[in-house]
Amino acid sequence: MTILVTGATGTVGRVLVDRLLGAGQRVRALTRNPEEARLPDAVEVVAGNLAERTGAAAALNGVDGVYYLSGVLDPECAIQQARAFMELAADAGARRIVDLSGLAVTVRRPGSYEMLRDVEEVVEASGLEWTHIRPGEFASNKLDMWGPSIRAENTVRSAFPDALGVPIHEADIAEVAAAALLSPGHAGHAYSLSGPQQLTHREQAAAIAQGLGRPLNFEPVTYGQARAAYITAGMPWDIAEYLLGYQAEYAAEPPEVLPDVERVLGRPGRTLAQWAADHASDLSDDPLQQAKNPAGTATG
């Protein structure tokens, strides 16, 4: 079986590539910059992107399954791209498709729900066996939110110290996607994914400290101070506002632990402490430690 992975150099895609190779599958990756992809030698890398029909058609030639990551934020462009790609996939004879959507569809969150659901509907109309993967908060967001202060000061700062979250390890998302691509019984399902623990920001900081094996300080800050810290660390202001908006929402409407990871994989999801242990090099200021895992790939 040959599986095409779009977004193969991304947070979930890299782990998915490893899991598919480990399962003995042939893996093809569509990427804009093959020379910078740093994918395993066994991966067939095809130059191109989803917006280019020629590259996408070449990548789809002879594949059995597809992992689809739109990566487009503009709703109209995302839908047009999805329609064009699904047509190419059907023409190429692909049988199964797994698309990365988001929990916003499950909870019908305004602003995100509409575009994600529209793309899902395009996937459903493709004629392929489809499965939607809808993760909530990625644990890897902590690398942008808290990574700079953890590396520099062993400190976590939060404007919502008692806001609850259920961050999910990217490896669990990838393994659910792999199961849907490789195993029967997943067609027509939409899996809503979360981490296995509902934790406040204070508790999340403690879990990360446990995983790293070193103490971390925790400092409550104001909304404005948190936004300024994100921007100073290099985050665009709109992304800073986006993340803080989610935190404010979670403080008022806490997300829940969802059962689909365990249902699909037959085990609980990885804890935030495990995620931190897997990303110890990303959260260290030691260059030698960082060099051990430069791509930030989950190993657990």
Image (tube, grey):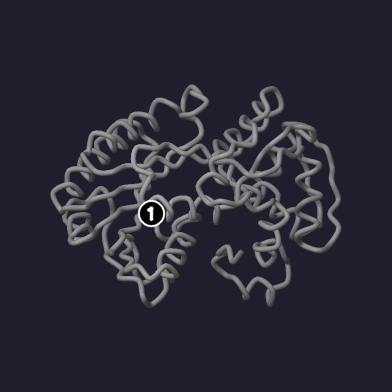
Task: Determine whether 58 is above or below 160 in the image.
Answer: below
Residue 180 position in % (x across, y down): 40, 50
SS class of the residue under badge 1? Answer: loop
Residue 227 figure quarter: top right
Image side of residue 13 versus residue 90, left or right: right
Q: Residue at x 59, y 36 (%)?
A: 258
Image side of residue 52 versus residue 11, left or right: left
Residue toward you, 34 or 26:
26
Residue lying furthest left: 91
Task: Determine whether 3 is above or below 131 in the image.
Answer: below
Residue toward you, 287 or 251:
251
Residue toward you, 225 or 120:
120
Q: Which image quarter is the N terminus in?
A: bottom left
Q: Residue at x 42, y 74 (%)?
A: 40
Q: Return the residue at label 1.
A: 183
Residue 294 position in % (x across, y down): 57, 70
Q: Residue at x 68, y 77 (%)?
A: 288
Give amino acid for label 1: Ser
